[in-house]
Amino acid sequence: MRALLFGPSGQLGRELLDRAARHDVTLLPVDRAMADLTDAEAVAAVVERADVNIVINAAAYTAVDQAEAEEGLAHAVNAEAPGVMARACVARGLPLIHVSTDYVFDGTGTAPWRETDPVGPVGAYGRSKLAGEQAVTAAGGRSLIVRTSWVFSPYGRNFVKTMLSLAGRPELRVVDDQHGCPTAAGDLADALLGAARRMVEEPGGPVRGLLHFAGAGATTWRDFAEAVFALEGGAAPVIVPVPTSEYPTPAKRPANSVLDCSRVETLLGIRPRAWRDGLAETLRALADRPGDSTI
């Protein structure tokens, strides 16, 4: 099976490339040199020419704070480009998997968010990602939109690697009133590749629509940070819990990003593993490449 992959250099894209062979999937990566996501004609042309069975979009503008000043660019990458991909897929009869985010919700309440809950993003990034979901759905083809949250991996920039880079400090102030489900990018990649196979092998099957996938178990950023240092071992800074109000950012963060992932087990037969297990695996992978903070 062959899949076109947008976003091969990001955390999720790198994990998809690493794990594709396990699922007997050949990925054809599309980097910026092949198609700038702000160039609709280039994006459509890549989909039109590719000898593939499915398209996976793991590309996104993810600079949450910067999006407040660059909403037009965020919208082009997160909304317009997925719409172009979806319409090009419809024209060829190809299924599409598109990755979205918990930021489509307003973050209120305490209950885990279900796929059927009303959306209401509170910032530019969330608005752009919701518009992307809507564009993919409006195209009318067979698509699977997978929302996730708090993604980390051995690659790129993420919370885990940021914490490790600050390990030498005596004290760290970390927000303790935002709740979410940390997600190992590798776990998400395995789920997407499994879904891709199902979509190709079962053209009339049930794998479509909206789906939530995140690590099992809810936590806060403070507790997440403490877990990073506890599993890493060695000296660690004192973690001081602070409220969001003491850590202002240009973009408002959802207080409740916890996703209900029960549908993924029903639809794909996958039960997300505990986020701490994914964290332990990530820390082991990072230990294998000491001194490398860029990949």
Image: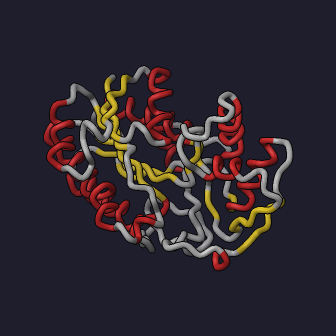
Residue 22 at x, y = what percent? 49, 22
* Count of residue discs: 0
Q: Is residue 171 left or right of residue 100?
A: right
116 w.r.t. 263: above or below:
below
Residue 231 at x, y = what percent? 79, 42
Name the residue at 20% across, 50% down. Answer: 39
Name the residue at 37% across, 60% down. Answer: 129
13 w.r.t. 151: above or below:
above
Residue 103 makes an appearance in the image: yes
Residue 271 makes an appearance in the image: no
Nearer to us in this view, 66 or 203: 66
Residue 243 at x, y = what percent? 69, 75
Nearer to us in this view, 11 or 189: 11
Looking at the picture, the colour scheme in use is: secondary structure
Task: Single out the residue that lies furthest toward the right.
Answer: 235
Q: Is residue 224 left or right of residue 235?
A: left
170 w.r.t. 94: above or below:
below
137 w.r.t. 56: above or below:
below
Is the N terminus in the top left, top right, bottom left or bottom right quadrant? top left
Residue 170 at x, y = what percent? 83, 59
Name the residue at 43% across, 49% down. Answer: 146
- Where is residue 45, by image quadrant? top left
Q: Is residue 97 left or right of residue 156?
A: left
Name the residue at 80% across, 62% down. Answer: 171
- Where is residue 57, by image quadrant? top left
Nearer to us in this view, 18 or 249: 249
